[in-house]
Amino acid sequence: MNHWESTLRRLWRDNTRNSHVTHVERLARGDTVSEDWPEWTPPSVRKRLAELGISTPWSHQVAAANLARSGSNVIIATGTASGKSLAFLLPCAEAIDQGGTVLYLSPAKALAADQRRSLADLGLPGVRAATYDGDTPGQERAWIRTHANYVLTNPDMLHYAILGRHAAWAGFLRRLRYVVIDEAHRYRGVFGSHVAQIVRRLRRVCARYRSEPTFILASATTGTPEESAGRLTGLPVRAVSEDASPRAALDFALVEPELTDQPGENGAPVRRTATAEAASILADLVGEGVRTLAFVRSRHASEVVAMTAQRTLTDARNYDAARRVAAYRAGYLATDRRGLESALRTGELLGLASTNALELGVDITGLDAVLVAGWPGTLASLWQQAGRAGRTGKDALAVFIARDDPLDTYLVHHPEAIFGRPVEATVLDPANPYVLAPHLCAAASEIPLTEEDLAVFGPAAEPVLADLVDRKLLRRRPRGWFWTRRERASDLADIRGSGGPPVQIVDAESGQLLGTVDEAAAHGSVHDGAVYLHQGLTYVVDELDLDEGVALVRGASPEYSTWARDSTEIEISRPLKEEVLNSSATVHFGEVEVTRRVVAFLKRDIRTGAVLGEQPLDLPERTLNSRAVWWTLAPEAADRLRASDIDLRGAAHAAEHAAIGLLPLFATCDRWDIGGVSTAVHADTGRLTVFVYDGHEGGAGFAERGYAAARDWLTATRAAIADCECKDGCPSCIQSPKCGNGNDPLSKSGALRLLDAVLELP
């Protein structure tokens, strides 16, 4: 019996309505297929790997290495812990043996540092590897530019610090043979679109130094990997997706937390939260000595899960286990993150509650179990997170814990939607003009743009260049386009979509820097009066100074949590597509302008969730130019619903929430990537209108996917509402955890009638 089975038995209550475990999928151990080393493998590499116990490679490693070595761009799209690093190490080591250089890109500093540590452990002769990121001391950077032949960095540093100073990197770039793009599935949406343009700029700068590197991409299993990789690099790419590595047997449980006795908003039943359930399971597993990683959906949740698990273990007088649980998230200082990674790797920590910052392939071996509290946005991410368990080859446990949310509830009751589906294709749009424009400026500042360069950036480049000339950001000359400003052109691109420099969170009493938060998120998380959690300690924000980029906090123990409320307005800038669904309803896609503002915050009792009060806030508006899908209902159809005593505002609002919850089934997105607005009569359409928009400047491709699948999407939305057992609506169907209006008004019956009219159902 595996040592987590007692925890599973506690969760499983056969033949009861409140059964926690709705399904267990048993995934068998995978067989391996090995091959001989490629004959061109450097003897020093083969010898060193043999010393480490690696006698033969797996067939997918050989296939990918041979493709790269032959000059084909290749993506290795295989499972977690399938040895992708070795696949790209082989050709890279040979290239370095022959005097070439390698550039390695990862989406997070932690992964680059981990890869650097692995290279150091290998100790390959002639490999001078170095990490070049924001934490690299200035005195080391000159040595790296001159002497390193394997540079590990991230897209941010490539964008801000390398391409703009390419002359200082001339020797490295001239000898560049391979560019490795690790965790390529993470480059999606607007961030992925920015990285796609950074890669195009890199190709252009390399051409200046007469090099044409081969691209090797490593990715979790993903749909249409060739297409996604081709869109990211702008080049044809071959895919290797047949995984020949050994896989541990995995018990994958789906868990729905039980209903509580507490009534929620509008008297709806409330389920125990996914974070509370995750904390309980984490405490149980750690108490049994099971090394466990719990993935949660937010920084706040990571703190809450760790604190709750510690408290549970302390109450059980298991003090040693309580000390071996911690939280891990972005916003911690780099030294704190490295310390936590090391403690989990060595076994000093038994349990860690983490945001998706640890989803990447950081080498944390020996994990027995992974908990996933809330849908992580995509199947690719779910399998990437679950795959962190069983890395030592032992049998493993993965648990998906549903939030009280339409999509999560649907998934735990429809396991075929998880275990019977191929993973999604990655969505990115390098032609997004809000993405393309700043990178054309950056490219022109690096080397003046010519007509021949336009093919690198695609057909959308020419009209965007004309606009940049009109805005006097670029100047057109006979020899091409030139950057006209003194400031750095790279500063125009906000590649992570943070909306500005991060806000520093400072303890007002000690002056200690606790962490950081994106400027866009600061409005809702560290506003005046907000409760802020950090490594098990509670603070209250005294002042948020957006001009200085600082939030001053003080230690406190309030008996309440805080929840920001916002208001959102939307205007249609330019309709692009429309499709008539029936005589009363039409679905549209186009460009919109969204104006948002955090207007107040609620105080909620931490024990009961009851609202204790509301305080207004005076924060600036934020404007977003994006793309949306929206559907409208003809006035005569709306009048018929109104005549049947349907509250149109509540009906539209409920349908909006449910549609946002279900869109991730049809687009590679998370509900936090998108937003919505609904109204009984919109000023631009003159009709009842429900909008769902991309929450990123210029759009991210998610709303367009919704438009393309509108009928199926809205049909699934109606089914999710109708199948829910509640009477008047609950978080499992129409209530939203991110609603800025406090989930008011909402009408479940009205949403069903409205969607019937939109879909022309009897």
Image (cartoon, helix red, strand yellow):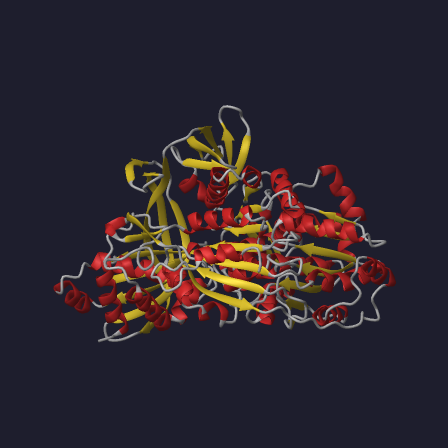
Where is residue 221 drawn, in percent x and y? 58, 67
Residue 192 sits above or below residue 277 on the image: below
Q: Which residue is located at x 41 percent, y 71 percent?
A: 708
Where is residue 589 drawn, in percent x and y? 37, 66
Please, which residue is most extreme toward the right here? 43
Asked if residue 45 can be seen in this view, the reply is yes
Q: Is residue 460 left or right of residue 167?
A: left
Asked if residue 430 can be seen in this view, the reply is no
Q: Quadrant of the C terminus?
A: bottom left
Residue 397 sits above or below residue 459 on the image: above
Where is residue 69 drawn, in percent x and y? 77, 68
Where is residue 546 drawn, in percent x and y? 45, 35
Residue 507 sits above or below residue 21 on the image: above
Q: Quadrant of the N terminus?
A: bottom right
Identify the image quadrant of residue 245: bottom right
Q: Which residue is located at x 45 percent, y 71 percent?
A: 416
Q: Nearer the viewer, residue 75 or 160?
A: 75
Q: Which residue is located at x 61 percent, y 43 percent?
A: 349
Q: Which residue is located at x 82 percent, y 62 percent?
A: 94
